Amino acid sequence: MSEPLGITVTNHVLSMQHRHEGARGAFTHLLNEIIMAAKIISSEVNKAGLVDILGSTGGQNIQGETVKKLDEFSNNLMIDRLYRSGHVAVLASEEDADPIEPPRGVQTGEYVVLFDPLDGSSNIDANVSIGTIFSILRKCSKGPEYQMEDLLQPGLKQVAAGYVLYGSSTMMVYTTGNGVSGFTLDPSVGEFLLSHPEIKIPQRGKIVSANMGYWDYWDENLKNYFRYLRTVTDTKPVYSLRYIGSLVADFHRNLLYGGVFLYPADSKDPKKPYGKLRLLYECNPMGMICEQAGGLASTGDGRVLEVEPSDLHQRVPLIIGSPQDVEEAVAFINGQRKE
């Protein structure tokens, strides 16, 4: 039965909790801290042009990218709110080289959270949609201290994943493994309200999202796929190219309308032989959401959620979206189709 529109995300999280026998509320408390952080970041994003929060801090993150002030604010806020919950064993951020250990004396818990505090931040100064991505795992090691194995778990082990899109409106989309729901922030009441219940991605779309600027780095199989998308056949239209450069924004559009997003391996680019996107902070959470909505997420060699992580900042190729589109793209990439 469909859920009524207007339910708050907090009420929705509580309803999910009630479905799990023995739930103690720790997970709900943790998600509520993420929700609160999203509200604060949304407020800062909306007034970023009015205060001194745009521009660079002058530093670089672990990826070698210039850190934006709003990036740094969002990262620090997520760390503070998540550890404040008392339910986190350890955190990891796309912005930090190493695990973010609990502050001395803070209460810890059974969950591990990995996050990208502000995806698409290169677009901040241009007022383009950006977002926050999060992945939640259960601590798998024994004992009170965290181990690297707690962070380096495959996406199949995620207990929840989600993102927040800061656009013309602020939306939160998340899953706990029981489908995907979307909530829109109503600024008049300060609450995320259910606006997109039971999201299902179309089986096939008409949109392809990829950075065509890297065409010369792609192998012939991948180029054949894009040539195919530009031709009309009896079974498909010409695809529209839509690329924002913010994974949250590109993925969100395709989740609702259907289509495929690709950030493939750049076989001729020594800087990105495995693509650009990070497995733990971007590909795994988006992969879980997409699969829960009926889509697929692949590296080109297999299912994203089955990749065994070897490094905190490991990069993998990503082909994600409508199932028929992803299957078709993977077939071309592997040379199984030519036209």
Image (cartoon, helix red, strand yellow):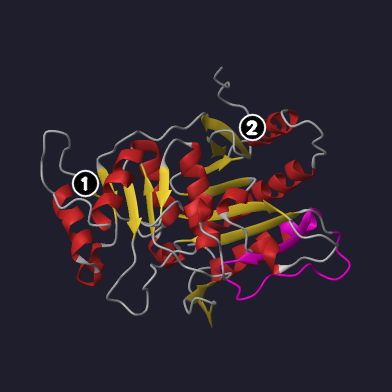
The one of 105 and 56 positioned closer to us in this rendering: 105
Which three-letter amino acid code belongs to the residue tagged 1?
Ser
Amino acid at the residue labelled 2: Thr
Q: Is residue 108 left or right of residue 195?
A: right
Q: Is residue 8 visible?
A: yes
Is residue 27 highlighted in magenta?
no
Q: Is 95 inside the magenta-drawn segment?
A: yes
324 to the left or right of 189: left
Say if residue 129 shows up in the picture. no
For label 2, the crowd category at 10 Å Cα-Cα, with few meaning under 14, some 14 to 19 and many 20 or more, is some
The residue depicted at 40 percent of the width and 52 percent of the height is 298
Q: Residue at x 51, y 52 (%)?
A: 305
Read off the magenta span: 81-107
| Residue 308 pos. (x, y %) | 55, 61
Q: Secondary structure at mark 1?
A: strand
* Mark 2 element type: loop
Q: Where is mark 2, residue-wise?
A: 8
Say whether disc 2 or disc 1 marks the residue closer to the N-terminus.
Answer: 2
Spot occupied by residue 92 in the image (x, y as percentages of width and height): 64, 65
| Residue shown at the point (47%, 32%) measured from the top left | 199
User: Which residue is under mark 1?
Assistant: 240
State the residue in front, 181 or 80: 181
